[in-house]
Image: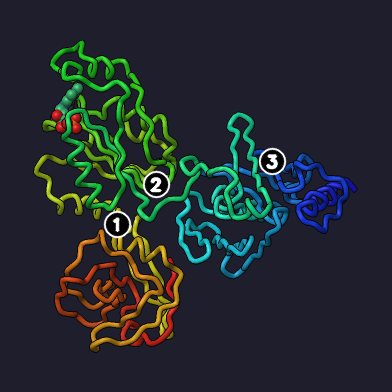
């Protein structure tokens, strides 16, 4: 009976949004606004102050996974006036609201909003047979406002209805707190007191196609602070006392990355205290840490145990010691030896009539811009009995990407002057305007048979 009552109360709240309201008395405040409050671990929610079960009869509660809040979404979306559908075979949740659609695949970080591809930092998942989805991403895309009360562990979702507010965010979403990862899910986080590690960090970020974030101590180190021949210098004192000097907030949200390339100078064989502050302050569980250093002569290996101790839930790879003369090839070798490329590589599937073609994309802006157009239907035609070409519906921005290479069978590229995609099944001629996008990982034998409309999607 209580359940029926609460369903009726929710329906009352839902119908209050529309002119055909089924419930008579409404205050001015609730006429055009719906406010849903949820709490971590609590199976009840309130809709405009009225209590209701979030997942009627199932007792499912919102949970925190990674650093994100996952909720059983159906009643929330339906309360807002949207719909939720479930595709069992592909384990995909389809959420529709106000002409927009979100597709979320269970345990996959790839999400689709209409035609755009996003990489989530916490994948939707199924717990105890219930589908739990990332509320922040959904709310932002459907233009609901979301507020998070840390102390109360409470989420408040608000939507204001009315012509002037339709399709407008109620308040700006907090992208810093719970945003969407960009294509490059790797960041170089580094500390450098005198600039050596900074130079190496910049080179590594370039080679890895990763973002860059500096650990900046709130109180900068002077040259006296760094005079480690003096026992009393600040650096030595901090090491001896296991200090954690305060550091500035990053401009980027570290939680959105899967791989942290962590750079530091060796101080007495170890990573400096400011790096320890970083490791203590951020939840890096589930992430891969790739340490690198500069030093007078000491290697990096002796410093890795401390990194593992301070980030026990992370995977810490082999380290890399660089110098002012480190070459790009050495960095690439380290990245390769530690599976960096395979971990951070985005793959695209072309569903050809004969068989699927899987393409591994490069870490460049053109590839990123291409991925942002997926999923796509591409109309492939033969060109010069060497390559299959297709024109994307929207021009792909290649302005920030290096161009010019000799394509080999299996290479995927954009020919900049025409803007067409090109997938090579024979080796081609060097072309200065050819922008590399990636290369085929499997299914190369099907390229020559590509003909007509082919679906391309993120793998
Ligand atoms: C407090 C302190 C301790 C250091 N200890 C070592 C060490 O144990 N072994 C070593 O080879 N270099 C050591 N160095 C030198 C630095 O690792 C080296 O100069 C590094 O490249 C500086 O990087 P940065 O310019 O990014 O700060 C130490 C430097 C300082 C300031």
The residue labelled by disc 2 is 257
Ligand 1 positioned in quadrant: top left
Q: In this view, does 402 lie to the left or right of 27?
A: left
At which x and y percent is residue 111? 50, 59
Work out whether residue 152 or residue 143 is closer to the camera in this orientation and state it. 143
Q: Who's the residue at 60% across and 45% down the image? A: 170
Neighbour class for label 3 at 10 Å: few (<14), some, many (≥20)?
many
Q: Are marks 2 and 3 in contact (CB under 8 Å)?
A: no
- Furthest residue to the left? 325
Q: Who's the residue at 20% across and 66% down the image? A: 403
Work out whether residue 426 or residue 77 is closer to the camera in this orientation and state it. 77
Asked which quadrant contains residue 48, the reply is top right
Look at the picture and state if 220 lies above or below 120.
Answer: above
Neighbour class for label 1 at 10 Å: few (<14), some, many (≥20)?
some
- Furthest residue to the top? 232
Work out whether residue 417 or residue 211 is closer to the camera in this orientation and state it. 417
At which x and y percent is residue 124? 55, 54
Q: Is residue 296 left or right of residue 414?
A: left
Separation of disc 1 and disc 2 at Cα? 14 Å
Look at the picture and state if 271 lies above or below 408.
Answer: above
Separation of disc 2 and disc 3 at Cα? 29 Å
The residue labelled by disc 1 is 341
At which x and y percent is residue 154? 64, 36
The residue labelled by disc 3 is 37
Q: Tell which circle, 2 or 3, labels the residue nearer the N-terminal end.
A: 3
Q: Do the residues labelled 1 and 2 touch (CB within 8 Å)?
A: no
Look at the picture and state if 268 lies above or below 136.
Answer: above
Q: Who's the residue at 26% across and 14% down the image? A: 237
At which x and y percent is residue 401? 24, 61
């Amino acid at each position: 009976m209580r359940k029926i009552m609460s369903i009726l109360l929710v329906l009352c709240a839902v119908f209050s949004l529309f002119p055909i309201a089924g419930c008579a008395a409404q205050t001015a405040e609730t006429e055009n606004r719906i406010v849903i409050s949820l709490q971590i671990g609590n199976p009840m929610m309130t809709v405009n102050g009225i209590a209701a079960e979030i997942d009627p009869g199932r007792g499912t509660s919102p949970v925190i996974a990674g650093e994100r809040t996952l909720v059983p979404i159906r009643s929330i979306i339906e309360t807002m006036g949207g719909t939720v559908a479930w595709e069992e075979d592909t384990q995909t949740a389809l959420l529709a609201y106000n002409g927009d659609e979100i597709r979320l695949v269970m345990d996959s970080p790839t999400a689709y909003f209409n035609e755009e591809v996003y990489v989530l930092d916490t994948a939707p998942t199924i717990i105890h047979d219930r589908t739990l989805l990332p509320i922040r991403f959904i709310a932002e895309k459907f233009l609901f406002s979301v507020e998070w009360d840390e102390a109360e562990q409470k989420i408040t979702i608000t939507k204001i209805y009315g012509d002037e507010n339709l399709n407008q965010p109620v308040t700006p979403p907090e992208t810093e707190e719970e945003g969407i990862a960009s294509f490059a899910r790797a960041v170089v986080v580094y500390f450098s007191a005198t600039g050596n590690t900074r130079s190496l960090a910049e080179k590594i970020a370039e080679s890895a196609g990763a973002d860059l974030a500096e650990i900046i101590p709130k109180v900068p180190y002077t040259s006296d602070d760094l005079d480690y021949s003096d026992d009393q210098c600040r650096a030595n004192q901090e090491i001896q006392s296991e200090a954690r000097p305060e550091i500035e907030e990053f401009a980027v949200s570290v939680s959105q990355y899967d791989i942290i390339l962590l750079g530091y100078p060796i101080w007495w064989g170890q990573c400096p205290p400011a790096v320890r502050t970083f490791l203590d302050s951020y939840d890096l569980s589930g992430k891969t840490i790739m340490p690198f250093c500069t030093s007078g002569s000491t290697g990096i290996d002796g410093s890795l145990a401390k990194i593992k101790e301070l980030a026990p839930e992370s995977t810490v790879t082999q380290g890399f010691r660089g110098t002012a003369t480190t070459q790009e090839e050495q960095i690439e070798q380290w990245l390769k030896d530690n599976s960096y490329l395979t971990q951070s590589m985005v793959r695209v599937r072309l569903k050809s009539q004969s068989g699927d073609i899987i393409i591994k994309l490069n870490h460049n802006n053109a590839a990123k811009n291409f991925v942002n157009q997926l999923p796509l239907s591409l109309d492939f035609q033969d060109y010069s009995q060497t390559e299959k070409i297709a024109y994307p519906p929207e021009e792909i921005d290649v302005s920030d990407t290096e161009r010019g290479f000799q394509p080999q069978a299996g290479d995927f590229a954009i020919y900049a002057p025409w803007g067409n995609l090109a997938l090579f099944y024979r080796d081609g001629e060097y072309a200065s305007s050819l922008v590399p996008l990636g290369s085929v990982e499997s299914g190369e034998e099907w390229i020559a048979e590509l003909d007509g409309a082919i679906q391309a999607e993120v793998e």
